[in-house]
Image (cartoon, rainbow, N blue to C red):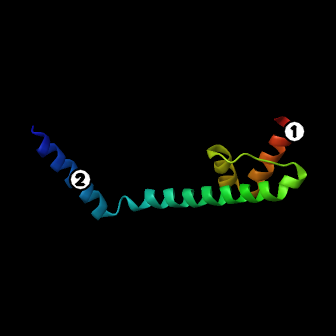
């Protein structure tokens, strides 16, 4: 088989996938997760700003952002407790 034929088949399948709407559901979940990660990062920034005078600092990276974004306020509380008492 020629490469142009294989590329044409793959391109046709991708177009069929987009036209059928099957790709909308995974994209929705990716968008929701991205919004939660951004909200978690903003909450961590607030904790670091207001907790700076109390000596509370939680590093902002992918793991802490994911924990705070998915778990919310309890996740941030857990991160602060882990940072203060364990690490």
Q: Which mark is residue 85?
A: 1
Mark 1 surroundings within 10 Å by alpha-carbon count, few (fewer than 14), some (14 through 19), many (20 or more): few
Q: Nearer the viewer, mark 1 or mark 2?
A: 1
Q: Which mark is residue 13?
A: 2
**Extreme left residue here?**
2
Residue at 21% over, 52% down: 11
Q: Quadrant of the C terminus?
A: top right
Is residue 62 rendered to the left or right of residue 13? right
Residue 13 spot, x, y in % from top left: 23, 53
Residue 66 spot, x, y in % from top left: 64, 49
Residue at 25% over, 58% down: 15
Depth check: give the residue in front, 62 or 7.
62
Q: Earlier in the sequence, mark 1 or mark 2?
A: 2
Depth check: give the residue in front, 44 or 32.
44
Residue 16 spot, x, y in % from top left: 24, 59
Residue at 62% over, 46% down: 62
Is residue 11 rendered to the left or right of residue 53? left
Depth check: give the residue in front, 20 or 30.
30
Q: Which mark is residue 4?
A: none
Q: Do labels 1 and 2 touch, CB within 8 Å?
A: no
Q: Secondary structure at mark 2?
A: helix
Residue 63 spot, x, y in % from top left: 64, 44
Is residue 3 rendered to the left or right of residue 33? left
**Extreme top residue here?**
87
Is residue 26 rendered to the left or right of residue 77? left
Marks 1 and 2, how far apart at CA: 54 Å
Mark 2 surroundings within 10 Å by alpha-carbon count, few (fewer than 14), some (14 through 19), many (20 or more): few
Instruction: Identify whether 85 is placed above or below 15.
Output: above
Q: Quadrant of residue 23?
A: bottom left
């Amino acid at each position: 088989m020629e490469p142009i034929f294989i590329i044409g088949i793959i391109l046709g399948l991708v177009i069929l996938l987009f036209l059928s709407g099957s790709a909308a559901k995974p994209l929705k979940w990716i968008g929701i997760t991205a919004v939660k990660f951004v909200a978690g990062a903003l909450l961590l920034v607030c904790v670091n700003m207001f907790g700076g005078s109390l000596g509370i600092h939680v590093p902002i990276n992918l793991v802490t952002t994911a924990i705070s974004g998915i778990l919310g306020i309890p996740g941030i509380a857990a991160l602060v407790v882990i940072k203060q008492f364990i690490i």
